[in-house]
């Protein structure tokens, strides 16, 4: 797009149609600041849909009668997993904004977190508490890019202070990011044959036994001698047979 070819996009027209926050969000998502931006109205529509989904999620949550505080000791595995995803996102977005200046990946992480949040249908006290924590953090994380909608949603969530001036950027809770369980890929002679889920502190012997007992993996071990079993902590188990 260029002025000389008369094929540029007037930002005022886009802002009038979609709002300033949507245009800002698309501009930050579509290209890093140091690169040229190829305007794509379908992409603007996508950002508009994302903000509308986020708005609905906050409003529906705010309509609940109360929002309990998170009791870390009382969380279920699913609640812990959502909270882990939240604090992983807080850490990533903070790093993307502050060190990497990578706004597009920060926005992508927030979009992924919203998808995760919308699949979480736990309406128990602690389920609502974790959801409240997540939505409040998302408002703060999006605030540098979409300040108008975040100012409104911060108040929808019941907060009196001004999110633009008086609320610090969220900090990741290191304890919340610790995984209780890990999913490991299992390979046989270098080819993926299955996955296993084990406790984060599982012993090597437990991991080896679980890998060999995985039903699909076991099919490839029949009538074979296990020559070597390699465990890469937190990632993969490779069984060499022959």
Image (cartoon, helix red, strand yellow):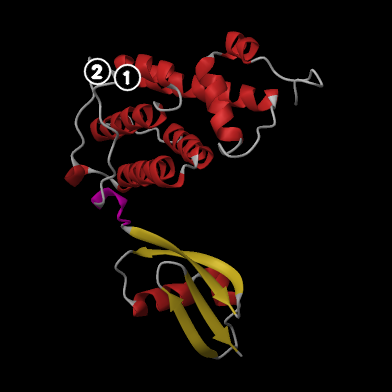
**Res 38 quadrant in image:** top right
Residue under numbered circle 1: 154
Q: Is residue 225 above or below residue 74?
A: below
Secondary structure at badge 2 equals loop
Q: Residue at the far front: name it.
A: 4
Residue appearing at x 31%, y 75% in the figure: 203
Badge 1 vs badge 2, beta-carbon distance below 8 Å: yes
The image quadrant where one finds the C terminus is bottom right
The mark nearer the N terminus, 1 or 2, is 1
- Name the one closer to the observer, 206 or 183: 183
- Name the one closer to the observer, 137 or 178: 137
The image quadrant where one finds the N terminus is top right
Residue appearing at x 63%, y 22% in the figure: 45
Q: Is residue 139 left or right of residue 119?
A: left
Q: Measured from the top left, where is residue 131 in percent x and y? A: 33, 31
Q: Is residue 159 left or right of residue 16?
A: left
Residue under numbered circle 2: 159
Question: Which segment is the magenta one?
Answer: 175-179
Residue appearing at x 44%, y 77% in the figure: 231
Q: Does residue 159 show up magenta in the picture?
A: no
**Res 204 quadrant in image:** bottom left
Q: Is residue 147 above or below residue 240?
A: above
Q: Measured from the top left, where is residue 128 in percent x and y? A: 29, 29
- Name the one closer to the observer, 182 or 136: 136
């Amino acid at each position: 797009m260029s002025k000389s070819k008369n094929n540029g996009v007037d930002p005022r027209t886009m802002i009038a149609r979609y709002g300033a926050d949507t245009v800002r969000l698309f501009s930050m998502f579509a290209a890093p600041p140091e690169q040229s931006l190829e305007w794509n109205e379908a992409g603007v529509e996508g950002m508009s849909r994302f903000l509308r989904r986020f708005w609905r999620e906050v409003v529906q949550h705010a309509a609940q009668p109360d929002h309990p505080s998170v009791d870390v000791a009382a969380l279920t595995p699913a609640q812990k997993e959502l909270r882990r995803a939240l604090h992983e996102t807080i850490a990533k977005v903070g790093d993307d904004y502050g060190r990497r200046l990578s706004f597009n990946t920060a926005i992508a992480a927030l979009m992924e977190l919203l998808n995760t949040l919308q699949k979480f249908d736990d309406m128990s006290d602690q389920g609502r508490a974790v959801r409240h924590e997540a939505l409040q953090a998302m408002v703060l994380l999006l605030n540098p890019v979409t300040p108008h909608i975040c100012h409104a949603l911060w108040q929808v969530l019941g907060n009196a202070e001004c999110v633009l001036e008086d609320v610090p950027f969220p900090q990741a809770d290191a304890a919340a990011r610790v995984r209780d369980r890990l999913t490991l890929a299992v390979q046989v002679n270098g080819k993926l044959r299955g996955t296993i889920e084990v406790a984060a502190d599982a012993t090597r012997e437990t991991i080896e036994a679980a890998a060999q007992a995985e039903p699909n993996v076991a099919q490839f071990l029949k009538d074979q001698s296990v020559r070597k079993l390699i465990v890469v902590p937190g990632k993969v188990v490779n069984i060499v047979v022959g």
